Every structure is written in structure tokens, then in C-alpha cells.
Amino acid sequence: MKSSDTFSANSSANNSTNHNGDAVAGSTAPAPSNFIRHIIEQDLQTGKHNGRVQTRFPPEPNGYLHIGHAKSICLNFGVAKSNNGFCNLRFDDTNPEKESQEFINAIKADIEWLGFHWSGEIRYASAYFDALYEFALQLIRAGKAYVCSLSPDQAREYRGTLTTHGTPSPYRNRTVEENIDLFTRMAAGEFAEGVHSLRAKIDMASPNINMRDPVIYRIRHVHHHQTGDKWPIYPMYDYAHCISDAMECITHSLCTLEFEDHRPLYDWILQNLDIATLHRASDSKEGVESYVLPRQIEFARLNINYTVMSKRKLKELVMQGYVKGWDDPRMPTLSGLRRRGFTSASIRNFCDRVGISRSESVVDLGMLEHSIRDDLDKSAPRAMCVLRPLKVTLTNYPLDSLDGPEVLELSCHPKEESMGKRKLPFARELFIDASDFEEIPPPQYKRLSPGTEVRLRGAYVIRCDQVIKDAEGKPVELLCSYDAATLGVNPQGRKVQGVIHWVPAQHAIDVEVRIYDRLFSKENPDDKTVGDYKECLNPESLVTLTGCKAEPSLKLAAPEASFQFEREGYFCVDRYDSTPEKMVFNRTVTLRDSWAKISS
RNA sequence: UGGGGUGUCGCCAAGUUGGUAAGGCACAAGGUUUUGAUCCUUGCAUUCGUUGGUUCGAGUCCAGCCACCCCAGCCA
């Protein structure tokens, strides 16, 4: 576990621009400035942890990671990296009922795809169950924890309310012997769920409800995905997390704002444990004297408009079939974004742009879109694909010759010559997009209409001579003529304003294109005053287009490869549903469209 | 008259020990352009929730007020 390979970004298929962790923040962007980095700088200056910075990313494996987790991942790994520190991956698996190995595997894959490597082996809170048990015994012996036999309902009543203090449990003064006996037997599986719990003895009158003798162990007769049936009791988050941090010698324990009120408890537990024992149980290679307890620091979680970010809601969307899975391209999950065509570099850049603070905010979806456009503009090869085909016949173009079609060469990128060129046959029969023709052109329209000229991208200028319509009056074919002198040169004496994309009819390949849009039609789906968030699901969030016509060079595209379909947007080959016989493309994001603003 | 937090441009977000408001997104106007894309240039907070106070000087210090968020799981 050298520091050099701890943070290097991977180079997965569409992680195209940045192949090393250094580029995470963007090459020209100044080092991010935020209050957490300031705290760490200060600690470094005062030598608080002997110059050590150790963070951790601690997901509970009860769902898939979403872009909010990416913010935390970038923070934890980023802050460690820029201070020559390390970041652990720890599964906070203290509630086996909701957790599974499937989620563990998915989380690992997502973090790796995002481009981060954790320090050493993967950690599990469940791997500390033995130590956690011993520490509980230590608290009991010190008279700082007791077995409470109140039912959950009774316990709630004793706890008091936000505005009234609590009442001590009648079991609060059990002897150490009795507590040890009971707790031992809890661990031996002698009791049913709910009949006993282990509580920290703190202060039932505390204004902070978390300090009113919080439960630290509960009885749960359930199988654990890591420890099997070994334990009938499981530690609570508040108890396990701080000790896990301490055991891993975490210096800065970064979490979200809702844990603010838990910090006094985090500190209480660690401060009431024997520091020497704690040190012995830890990863520490230093002496007890230089062993410093971790500090919890909270930051605001990520919110983005037009989507939801809570695991509970995302899970509901999956379970109730509103989307096709955790990795549905409309989901804000990392696997969904990946499948949609977002690169990991774009997500890292997005997180940097958003920043870290303590004020709860809602980031505009436009920021995310900008991040992916920014990346793909530089890295995605260009291609042409006609989404809604309208046939064009060039009446003055020669019929197919025996020598085969005329073949044009187009650049794969307007600026990056290194991306090379692609071949594209030109022919008498073509397809253009239906939206690029208007019989009665609106003001400022620069595309094709009867009698006007337009440039076919990378090819000739054509003029529309005649419109063939179906029974309903809808154009089904355009008879046009081409100007043979305009290949690579502008016509003389007149200016052709519009440029439209096209594909040759006979050589184009039929593909399916999935047009994705925001999942919700309301900016804040969480707004309870308007009703359930599921009621504002955007019915147009997925529109599947079949019979789209793509240029033949796309035939070779690999799963997850991203392209810019010129004048349309960025699209990627669906990593699961696309086959060489029937290709499927996902629209990642549109191009910016100033025409849409003018025309509306 | 419970506790803990947060309020700087439409959206994020920097703002060292008080010295006279970074940057990004969005938006607008020009320029380049065989993508109405990209790129380039320019514009975009006399003002920091609010009211007072301290000070030669306050977003930064003090006091009051207002708004919003979190907490009463044997979830995390």
C-alpha cells in the first residue's frame, strides 16, 4: 500500500480524459478551499496527529452508491491525497437486516470506477464485533453502561420529548455483576429480540436526546452477511462508528450534517474507554502517548434539483418498478450515471465545482450537465446519426456506379486531429432529420425548406426542389439537387448558412436510441407540500426511438463508448443491451441549444 | 423560555489576524466556426438574512430579531 497507487484513477473504458488521480480537480483549477481542509491544515501545523491524515469512506451496504456519495468519496480520498494521507473503505455493516453482499460488490465496483483506491484491505465494522463486545464489557465494569429491560415502547416514553427531559430507566442502577451476567447472556442468544438492550449511562436530562442513555447494543436474531450466525446482538451505529474510527486510527471522521447532534456521543464513548486498550486494539504503530482520538466533522450533503437523493426513495423507485433498476440511466446512482454515459472524470469534476460547506443547498442539474459536456466535448469522437429520418433524394446525383459509392473522409474531432478520420459513403439517397426541414420556415430558420439551400455536414450543399407528402400532408421525401462544386469549398456569390447532419440511406445502420430526460418534472420532488414525490415523475424521462439511422463507422463502437452525434448531443453504447446486430445508444446529454431558446 | 445548525449574485461557493466582495454554473451581448456545438472577448452583488452597536473602517467583532434545516429508531 504505497501512497502512489492509493489514489491513482483507473482507466476504465470511458474514463477518457484523466488517467491519473492528479487530474481529479481539473488541471487549471486552484486547490479547493473549504473549512475541512482548513481544519486539517491547522492540525498539520500544530502537529496534532504527527502530520498524519487518515480518512475513511464508510457506506452501509444497504443500497447502491449515488452521486451524493461521490461527493463524500471525493472529499475523503481527495483530502487524504493532498495531504499525503490515506483513506480507508469501511462497510458500516451493523444492521444486517437491510444489508447484502450484492450491495457490497456494487459499492466496491462503483468506487473503483470513480477512480479511487482505498488504503489496504477493505474494512468491515463487523470485523470489529469481538473488540466492540470487549469494550462494552469495559463500559459495564466502569459503571458506564447497563442492561435495560424496558420495551422499545417504554423506552420511548422514558426518553422524554424534544422539550421535556427524560426519566431514568428503572434498570439504570443494576449492579455491574448483574449487567455482565445479562449482557453475556444476551450475547449467548438467551433472550428474544427487544427484551433487553445495552445502554450507555449518560444523562436522561440532557437537552440532546442522543445523550439520554442511548442504546448501544440490541438483540437481533438474524444472519449477518459477513459474520453469519455468530452474533445474536449487534452494536448500534453511534457505538460502533466512533470505535471503528479509533481502531483504524482515523484522524478526521467526515460525515453529513444530520450527525451533528451525535458528535457529543461520539466523543463520550471514546473518552470513556480506556485509551490504552483502545490503542492496543487499533492499527496504530505509534506509542499510546501520541495516540489521538479522531474528530468528527460534518458537512452538507449533496442535493440536485429534479431528482431525489435518499437511499430510501431510490430503493422505492427500483422496487416498485418506476425505473428498471439501480443502474437505470435516469437514476442519480453512480451505476446509473455510468450507464447513461457520464465519465468518472466528469463526476469528480462536478464534485469539485460544487464544493464543501455546511449550508444545505440544492445544486442545479445544469452544473452536472456542464461537467459531462465539458469532458465529452474534448474526448468524444464525432459521428452522425439521424434520429427521425426523412428521406432525401438527390435527383441530379449519378446513380450508383459499378466502382462503388463515393466515399468521403470526415474528421473524428474538429480540433483534435490525433483522433483521426472516418470514412462515410455519399449517395443519391440520404436521410436527414425531420426537424431539419420546415415547409414554412420560422424566422431565423437556417435549415432546409422548399427552394433554400443547406450544407450537408462534411459533404455538399443541396437545395430542396420538391416535397413529397403523404395523405395527411406530412413530408415523406424531399427531392433535392446537389451542387457538385461545393465539396470542401463554399459556393461563390451566395452564402449558405445552415449545416445539417445526414447519413447515406443504403449504408446507414439501424439503431435504437434511448432519449433520457430528467426523472422528475418538478424541481424539488421532495417538497411534501405538493404531495408524494412519485407523483411528479416525468412521463417523458425515457423515450425510445427505433429505426434511427447511424453512420456505418459506428458499427465498431464498443460498449460504453461515447460519441457526439453532431448537432444532437452525446450518446454512449449501452453497456448491457447493445449488440453488434442491434445497437442501442443512450443519450447522455444534449448539446447546448441556443436555437431552442430563439425558436421558443 | 428543548438542543444543535445555516443564511454572501438566479444556482453552487471563496472570503487570512476587521481595510473596502474570488471562481464556477446560468444568463446576456459581440467575434470565430462546414456542429445554431466548441472556442474567444465583454457584461453580470456600492453589497454580504435583518435591525442596531463597536470602529477611521465590518461580510468579517458584539447584541437583538427573522427565515430555513436537523434531532424524540432497540436505522445509518
Image (spheres, coloured by chain):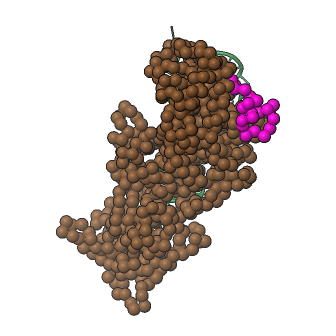
From what the image shows, is residue A31 above or below residue B17? Answer: below
Q: Position of residue A273 (x, y in %)?
A: 69, 26
What x and y, as percent, mark residue A375? 56, 58
Q: Residue at x 49, y 24 (%)?
A: A195
The magenta span reads A271-291
Q: Is residue A2 left or right of residue A332?
A: right
Q: Compared with residue A228, is residue A461 higher up or lower down, i.e. above or below?
A: below
What residue is drawn where x is 52% and y is 36%?
A95
Task: In this rendered view, identify the residue nearer to me: A201 or A571.
Answer: A201
Residue A134, image x, y percentages: 66, 30
Relative to A589, A269 lies left or right? right
Q: Which chain is green?
A: B
Quarter of the image holding residue A393?
A: bottom left
Q: Is residue A547 above or below residue B1?
A: below
Residue drawn 47% across and 21% down? A151
Q: Nearer the viewer, residue A365 or A209?
A: A209
Q: Residue furthest left?
A: A471
Q: Is residue A219 visible?
A: yes
- Residue B56 in the image: above or below residue A500: above
Instruction: Please identify which colour was used for chain A in the image.
Output: brown
What residue appears at the point 62 percent right and 40 percent down from the top-left corner? Answer: A127
Q: Residue furthest bottom?
A: A402
* Number of dots carrying numbers: 0
On the question of residue A501 being in view, the answer is no
Which residue is at the front of the view, A231 or A20?
A: A231
Magenta includes A281? yes
